[in-house]
Image (cartoon, coloured by chain):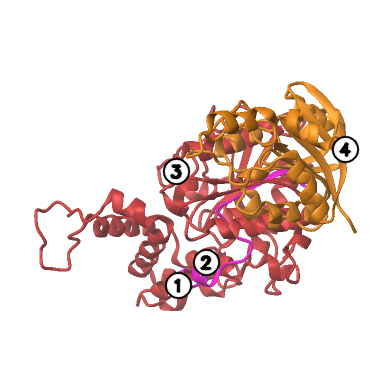
Amino acid sequence: MNIKENIKKIIVKKPLQLDCGKTINDYPLAYETYGKLNEKKDNAILAFHALTGDQFVSGINPVTNKPGWWSYLVGPSKAIDTNKFFVICANVIGGCMGSFGPSSIDNKTKKTYGTNFPVLTINDMVNAQYNLLEFFNIEKLYSVLGGSMGGMQVLQFVANFPNKTKTAIPIACTASHSAQNIAFNELGRQSIMADSNWKEGNYSKLNLSPDKGLAVARMAAHITYLSKKGLQEKFGRKLQEKDDLNFSFDADFQIESYLRYQGSIFVDRFDANSYLYITRAMDYFDLIKQFKGNLSKAFEKTKTKFFIISFTSDWLYPTSENKEIVIALNSSGADVGFIEITSDKGHDSFLLDVPEFLKTVNNFLEANY
Amino acid sequence: MKKEFQIISELIENNTRVLDVGCGDGTLMKFLIDKKNVDTRGLEISKNNVQSCISKGLSVIEGNAEKDLHQFSNLSFDYVVLSQTLQAFYNPEKVINDLLRVANKAIVTIPNFGHWKVRTHLLLKGTMPVTKILPNEWYNTPNLHMCSIKDFFNFCAEKKIELYKSIALNVEKTSEINNSNIDIKNLNSELGIFLIKKIK
């Protein structure tokens, strides 16, 4: 936990009225930066992380000691070249990497908030992160980008602040969370809440942790990030360190062992209540409803140049949902480009070494700078 | 740049909004932005071409004219350009209607199946014509609905589409096509370039 004390953060003094009606102020917002802000302050890129991401985009994450979640894309001489661009990323509020979240201590009770934390929305997360522009004294960003929930934040950012970024790259996302996506998130939440250690969210006060529930939530979610073809090619029916079936409920198959491993490493770095809050924010995301059924109204005032990217094998945020955003941008007369990247790696493609994707982001950012 | 693109750009007024359907590597779009201060969007089916456009800073949407024109709202452009692809669609009539829904005016170019080389090829050899402009064999051509300049003329008359301007291109030479010279232009032109508009 000591490492987390060293995380960079700002304390946001300005009150933020949340969509739920409550107001928060003097709350911490943890962030990390890569590269240098130039004198003209025109090279800043705000990256938004996805559900289980954090501010450690590139390099080695000091808390997990693993490479940052967007190491393939961001770094010196990478697709987003940090020798040239200044990349900022904040941990979303509701998260568990130093920003204000359910594992923060409530000054009134001197205990963690747990489920007394207010229910947040993507809009709240974006409004909180907007304070970083003021902190860095940046009048206008060069770009905002993100995949999955990060892409939703990109859309919300431009809708809220139409003239605060020159370009925007929403990746593998949607303007309105689908029933299928809500269903998967609910599965994850129910799994956490079914763990007897969850204790209505009060586990940390009792020195407990609903690890089993959180691990199952992660396992289920992880399947949705891959594709059938990708899974079949990587694992097929291969057995885990054995020659034949065990006639037991051990992890006979490699895919079982893989998912169990993914679940087990996840609980070391993620807070169960944060998982509940952030998935809820995703489910509540409906930019179409925010603009009374007409998504193009969200982008009416913007001069931001958009580029939207989807992946062929992404069935969680499929191309069709990404295209809805393209259509809305087109009908509002906004400047928009779009490409569907061919990849077998499912929704996770945006986090992986998919050369065509990396090239697209690089080409777009270099050509418009 | 191709002579065809020069003629197209001469048909487009400055400071307008142009959708280039099948924009390729974005050569025409780039030219229009630089010379005519035009606000352009491209629709392109090939991923490689889309990448070329992105690296030129052009706004291009990956897609197919038959499936993806619906995403553009009515009269959201001043011009829409369709260069040498009309013959490759399943339903060229529907595409033309869509073009004239999206933009006030459309610029359509067609490789002329009425050109004398095409005619003599079929007449003398008795096999499907293969020429410089139509380089594919019958079994691998993307062209489903070949037409001649005269066919397109007749089509416009029948469908109440106004031919604002009709230009014949033969090698590098251009000339106007009209009702009195249509038969000769249909014989000696490789390409027809048409600026069309819906008759209200």
The residue that label 1 is drawn on is: A189
Q: Which residue is mark 2?
A: A279
Q: Amino acid at mark 3?
A: Leu
Residue B178 tag number: 4
Query: Which stretch appears magenta?
Result: A164-184
* Left or right side of A331 for A348: left
Instruction: Please check the rendered image and state whether residue A270 is part of the magenta-colored stretch, yes or no.
Output: no
How far across and how far down the image is residue A219, in percent?
36, 62
Name the amino acid type tagged 2.
Thr
Q: Are marks 4 and 3 in contact (CB under 8 Å)?
A: no
Q: For this view, does A180 lie left or right of residue B8?
A: left
Mark in front: 4 vs 1: 4
Chain B colour as displayed: orange
Q: How many marks?
A: 4
Sequence-wise first label, 3 or 1:
1
Q: Chain of mark 1?
A: A
Going by the numbered disc 4, the residue's amino acid type is Asn
Report how far apart the C-alphas of labels 4 and 1 lie in the structure.
71 Å
Residue under label 3: A352
Labels 3 and 1 touching (C-beta < 8 A): no
Residue A163 lies, with reference to residue A18, above or below; the image says above
Across and down, in percent, residue A183 comes to 48, 73
Give the Cα distance between marks 3 and 1: 26 Å
- Observer-side mark, 3 or 1, equals 3
Residue drawn where x is 39% and y is 62% of the image = A218
* Viewer-proximal residue among B189 and B30: B189
